[in-house]
Amino acid sequence: MRSDFGRPDQKETPMLVDKRLMSLTHGHRRTLNALTLVVCLGTASYWVQAWFLANALAGLLPSQNHSAAQVAGSLLAVLSCGLVRAALQQVQVRLASALGTAVRLELRATLADALLRPERLRDSSERSGARRLALSESVDGVEPYLTAYIPHALQLQLLCPILLAGVAVLNPVLAAALLAAVVVAVGAPRLWGRLLARRSATHWDSYEALSADFLEALQGMRTLKILDAVPRFRTRLNDRSEALHRATVATMRVSLADTALADLGIQAGLLAAAALTALDVLGAFPAGLGGEPALTFFALILASEVFRPIRDLARQWHAGYLGISALGSIEAVIGSDGKEHSGPLARPEVRPAHAAGGREPHGHIVELENVSFRYEPDSPWVLLDTTASIRSGGISALAGPSGAGKSTLFDILLGFLPFTGQCLLDGRPLQTGDVSVVSQHSYLFPGTIRANLQAVQPEADDGWMRSVLDRAGLGAELAAWPRGLDTVISEAGHSLSGGQLQRLSVARAILADRPVLLLDEPTSALNSELAAELMNTLRAEARHRIVVMIAHRTDALEAADRVLHLRDGALHETFLSTCPEAS
Ligand SMILES: Nc1ncnc2c1ncn2[C@@H]1O[C@H](COP(=O)(O)OP(=O)(O)OP(=O)(O)O)[C@@H](O)[C@H]1O
């Protein structure tokens, strides 16, 4: 799914404020209104200042007979306007930051919610780099649009008419000339708004492609090296980079032309204002100001103030186009109506065991009722009408030949696959938040051990974390690492040995404290002593949660209390001698 936003054949010329981007401030309208008000007040302070400045200038004319005190008073008022403006700017920065943070957090959560859905994660047409870009740069691109561009666009729409009306009261001819200049300064750049929107979209697409290629090159560097494909990939990245450069220059050209046109309108307006004011002073207009110096100065300064909101907005035009081009990436994730993330496959509510009021006193039971699943309508059934129950109270080993469907069953229990039938936990539908998992390729985040553990259990204190690490068999290593829990792990856990990585992943899964714990051959990288130790820990965990472990090796099977054989799409349970039910 790719949004067609900004493509010339689909959408109209971008208006001053884009409705879809504006809708992102829904829920924060008060902050946006306050921000716009502060921006407007800052601009209005120039008008007040203009009045005092006009009086001070008129007071300097010998014909006006103003006292020095009057002139000094006017100049003091001019200074006070400057101070008020400085204070308003501080408030503006704070409001913009509050609005930006709130919208950024909300938008990122919405995007993450839409992206982290099973069917999206399985969609091989979506590239990780594009997803990453949507989550990071597109949100960052939208923020200045909301916090800087929109308030200034609203200011322009509000203040320009007021100011033009004010000038019209003083000098209607001057107001008419200013109106013409405003129309040129604001309207002319809109004439090729479509072209700029199209170039912005091309620029974004180039950026997205480069970003996706770069991320994939980094992730697959090992493979690229093995395949001797690094030079080819380097050439491809260079090509992408050049395409991005070309797109950037093309966008800049149009953007510069925009600015030049706006400036032309402003300069022409200012020149016309000066000429008309001079003519007015010479008495050329019957309805003019009649040579009243203070009013003449005031009208002249106000005439230049008419263009202040336009100049302010012109400074934000880059933010404007950045926001609009980023919107395409956002819409590609959440849909143009923003409803994509609330579909039936939205993430289920996470309900860890401890959040549901403590552990089930009598243990847990997972029941599969007539569960069927196959990957494609014409591919063989991996599970067919399977009915089985898995209880806590001992380790269940999941066995079966390669390709029997063990990993698929795990994915079903995790809620990643759309199966038919029912999966129940203690009589209610099993949810993703009920399950923690240790896969063969558990991902550890770059950062400290503490951060990796607290990612699943934010409230875990040092004592809890140490105890879990100890139970997972990492106690000795933890004591030997000089920085203990603050030991830094490199990306994907590369700084750890395979066995350490495995035990840390088990510790993290135990710490998550969920009623179902799934493990894919958790002892494969451990020596027999550590493996036996870990199995004892898992057996202890299995007293109060369901522990299911994919087991290929005989020693892992022997350590289990019961075996679930997956054969021909069905689960067959065998109790071993140590199993409580067997006795
Ligand atoms: N994403 C997929 N798309 C289509 N078919 C798949 C997909 N993943 C697995 N399969 C197929 O589903 C069947 C079960 O695969 P699964 O990986 O669950 O088996 P397994 O028992 O875990 O195998 P192993 O022990 O080798 O890991 C296999 O025939 C496999 O080819």
Image (tube, rainbow, N blue to C red):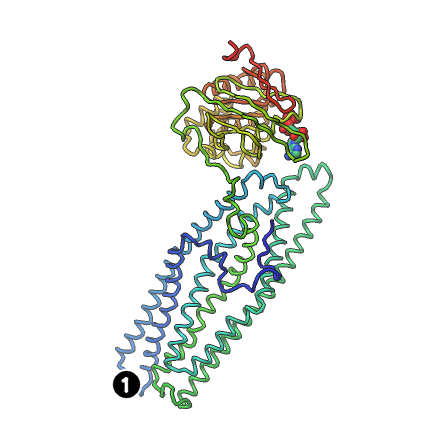
> Is 172 on the left-hand or right-hand side of 406?
left
Q: Is residue 553 above or below residue 164?
A: above
Q: Quadrant of ligand 1?
A: top right
Q: Which percent across, then down, holds residue 405?
A: 63, 27
Question: What residue appears at the point 59 percent right and 56 percent down from the top-left corner?
Answer: 4
- For the image, the number of numbered tags is 1
> Is 8 on the left-hand or right-hand side of 229?
left
Question: What residue appears at the point 57 percent right and 35 percent down from the top-left corner?
Answer: 418
Q: Which percent across, then down, holds residue 43?
A: 39, 68
Between 40 and 497, the residue placed more toward the observer is 40
Q: Residues within 10 Å of mark 1 (few under 14, many from 20)?
A: few
SS for callout 1: loop
Does the Cβ of the disc 1 residue fall within 8 Å of ligand 1? no
On the image, numbered disc 1 is attached to which residue? 65
Q: Which percent across, then down, holds residue 231?
A: 72, 45
Q: Amino acid at mark 1?
A: Asn
Q: Which percent across, then down, holds residue 172?
A: 41, 82
Q: Is residue 317 above or below residue 242?
A: below
